Amino acid sequence: MIIISILLLGTLGLLMATLLTIAHKKLAVSLDEKVALLMKVLPCANCGACGYAGCENYAEAIVKGEAEPNCCPVGGREVAEKIGEILGIKVETKEKVVAVLTCQGGIEECKERFIYDGHLDCKEANIIHQGMKACLFGCLGLGTCVLVCPFNAIKMDEKKKLPIIDEDKCTGCGICVKECPKGVLKLIPKTKLVYLACVSPDKGREVREVCKVGCFACGICVKACPYDALKMENNLPIMDFEKCIDCGICYQKCPTKSYVDKVKKRPYALIDTTCNGCGECVKVCQFKAIEGKIGERHRVIIEKCVGCGECFRVCPIRAITMVGALGYTYKEV
Amino acid sequence: MNISPAKVFFASFLVQNILLMRYIGLCPFFGVSTRISTSFGMGLAVIFVMLLATLITYPIYHFFLLPLNLEFLRTASFILVIASLVQFVEMFLKKSYRQLYNALGIYLPLITTNCAILGTTFLVIDYRFHLLNTIIFAFGTGLGFMLVIILFAAIREKLDYAPISNSFKGYPIAFIAASLVSLAFLGFANLFGASL
């Protein structure tokens, strides 16, 4: 009995082992060495942001020469450079982008037109009279983006009913942007700090009726922008990212605070003793935060200073410093 | 045991559903049932492997183990055969049917020696089915698995939005929901007189 069972199990095991060994040899998919190397470099999250079904397909496409090595937004510059090393080519890296929510109309700011009782999915809610929000263009806050994010970078602010995007986790794959039926999620360069958070192309009065934080196209920001980076189109100021230097003046001037300034705490200006009182800074300050007589040392009224850095940029003798600018550097023009 | 194939099918599919009535294969049932799309892939993979496993173990049991009085070896030998066979199929799919591999690939190794698969192969032996009933039983069980896991995934997708107290969030409420679905399936008892 024992001998027979040993023999039987042994034979079975041997048979299966032979089968698998033969299969391993015969059926081996000739995985390119380069593909295997690339797979080690790629994030292997299979998010599909590159346009291929998964990381393996993308790696194959790179090796075949069908895909550019810089299409992986998740890995960004590091991965693209490593891919370049493996393939022995130089790679131009794309700018790292993150998703942002361009709507601030939470449940408080933008009321609901009717009570939506259906399946908690933005796409389904959007089918019914374009959703329950008073603003036809605003975020529905049902969390389709939270569900689709493969990196768990989005969570829902239950009080406001608006999604919050964790920028450290967001890889800029753009899946949420594609899935959002309202188009309120956008990809912007990670270095971009100020952006307009409203997408409603409605006229001013209509926007004001439905939303407290919606842009009603007053045009104050367009006039205030010292760099000519804003242009009014379709009742919305369109920002030219090339020209914008994130000074945040538009955010400060906006009467409804439709802008978002990612700089949590901006520093304030300080004029030192070398100031000769030329008065250039007084001219550019849009917040009347600098006072002083011509020819004498000027003074900054700290309460009024918003930290836009305009005076800092125009001062001909560099007598102005921005205080408390930890982790934030002012862009030169 | 001589029993009509229709009865075998309904018994395995609904009346004695493997997940809700027998409570076998709970690990994939709770692990992969968070999204409908993944549970669909899992269901397909289970049907496939279940058919394959019963088909291969049936002759092994009836032509080798039974004549040699080695029934006690069935666990060891079945696991060995099923695991290596699924491994082989995975390689084969990877080589020949890339699309199918992409769809099923990640689920196949998960269920190689899953208890639902092994349990089904034992059940068909315990019920003394002939070959046709064996195939129908395996197919019905796999189909039942798929039906229940997809239904349950739909429930769990809804559960994500429900206001559940912290201590019940996640698996606890999933288990409670599963028990309720199981109760609902009791309604199928003796459907078409199908029970084994």
Image (spheres, coloured by chain):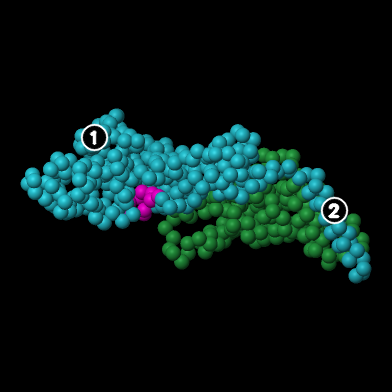
Chain colours: A cyan, B green
Give the tally of numbered discs.
Answer: 2
Q: Residues within 10 Å of mark 1 (few under 14, many from 20)?
A: many
Is residue B137 at least partly visible in the picture?
A: no
State which chain disc 2 sits on: A
Specify the segment rendered in magenta: A157-165
**Which residue does the image show at 72% across and 55% down from the upper left?**
B112
**Which residue does the image show at 60% across and 33% down from the upper left?**
A66
Q: Which residue is mark 2?
A: A18
SS assignment at label 2: helix
In the rendered image, the quadrant that contains the N terminus of chain A is bottom right
Q: Nearer the viewer, residue A138 or A133?
A: A138
Is residue A98 a member of the stretch shown in magenta? no
Q: Any mark on residue A222, and which?
A: 1
Q: Residues within 10 Å of mark 2 (few under 14, many from 20)?
A: few
**Which residue does the image show at 29% across and 47% down from the upper left?**
A330
Depth-wise, is mark 2 or mark 1 nearer the camera? 1
Is residue B169 at least partly visible in the picture?
A: yes
Amino acid at the residue labelled 1: Val
Q: Where does residue A223 sit, x and y in percent of width and height?
A: 20, 34
Q: In the figure, is residue B9 to the left or right of A106?
A: right
Q: In the figure, is residue A202 to the left or right of A56?
A: left
Whether discs 2 and 1 lie on one chain: the answer is yes
Rounded to the nearest angstrom, the CA distance separating label 2 from label 1 is: 75 Å
